[in-house]
Image (cartoon, helix red, strand yellow):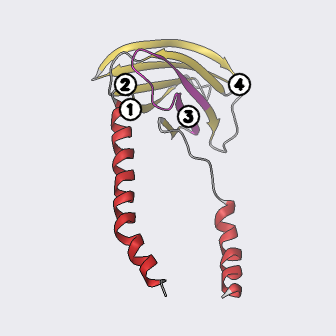
Amino acid sequence: MIFGLVFFVFLAIPAISDASAHSLFNSAEEFIGGFRVQIATLPEFPQIGEKSQILIRVTDSDYEEVDRFMMGMRFTYHGDQIQAITPQSVEGSHWETDFIFEESGNHIVYVDLYDMKGQGEILTYTFNIGTQSPFGYIFFIAITIGATMFAIVIGYIYLPKRFQKFKP
């Protein structure tokens, strides 16, 4: 029994070494034209009317961060452009900006990279960013309370039967 447990632990070590951190809910990445763009929001669930950060990271196809890039962004909601960030040069591979979401729901963000290969072409990356109204917390709390109540009911039904087996 102990030998089998030790053997299982040693077999599981390679699987554990490949574990990675949980990515943010509103994060994504896309490869186009030999470049990878990653986007994320802070907080994870942007709130309506509150400042959120949009985080951008650009790497090449070998996951090496680029030294400099030129980019612009367009924010759309229900097919209408609500805001745009004019193209600007960014030193390094990371860029962040503050943004205030005014409507609850799914926003489409277009990230345009300009002249990445020196040929004057524009690479456009498309991302979805979901926002949440303050009532979203009620949903999460209701799910948590429901799961807790389910666990209590299951425990109340099955635990007494398990303890009865051990009585002399």
Residue occupied by mark 3 = 37
Label 2 environment density (alpha carbons within 10 Å; few <14, some 14–19, many ≥20): few
For discs 1 and 4, the disc positioned in front in the rendered view: 1
Three-letter amino acid code at the position of disc 2 = Pro
Residue carrying label 4: 92
Percent of width and height locating residue 71: 56, 20
Disc 4 element: loop
Q: Is residue 22 above or below residue 88?
A: below
Residue drawn at the location 49% of the way across and 24% of the way down = 112
Q: Give the residue drawn at x 48%, y 25%.
A: 111
The residues bearing labels 3 and 4 have C-alpha atoms spaced at a distance of: 13 Å
Label 1 vs label 3, nearer the camera: 1
- Considering the image in quadrants, where does the N terminus appear? bottom right
CB-based contact (under 8 Å), mark 3 and mark 2: no
Q: Residue furthest front?
A: 168
Dot placed on the residue nearer the N-terminal end, 3 or 4:
3
- Name the residue rendered at 48%, 19% in the picture: 73
Q: Which residue is mark 2?
A: 134
Counting from the top left corner in percent of width and height, residue 7 is at 69, 82
The three-letter amino acid code for the residue at tag 4 is Gly
Residue type indicated by callout 1: Tyr
Residue at x 33%, y 24% (from the top left corner): 104
Question: Magenta segment, which residues?
Answer: 34-57
State yes or no: discs 1 and 2 in contact (Cβ < 8 Å): yes
From the image, tell me which residue sits under label 1.
137
Q: Residues within 10 Å of mark 4 (few under 14, many from 20)?
A: few
Disc 1 element: helix
> SS for tag 3?
strand
Cα separation between marks 3 and 2: 30 Å
Mark 3, Cα crowd under 10 Å, few <14 / some 14-19 / many 20+, is many
Q: CA distance from mark 1 to mark 2?
A: 6 Å
Of residues 36 and 166, which is closer to you in this image?
Answer: 166
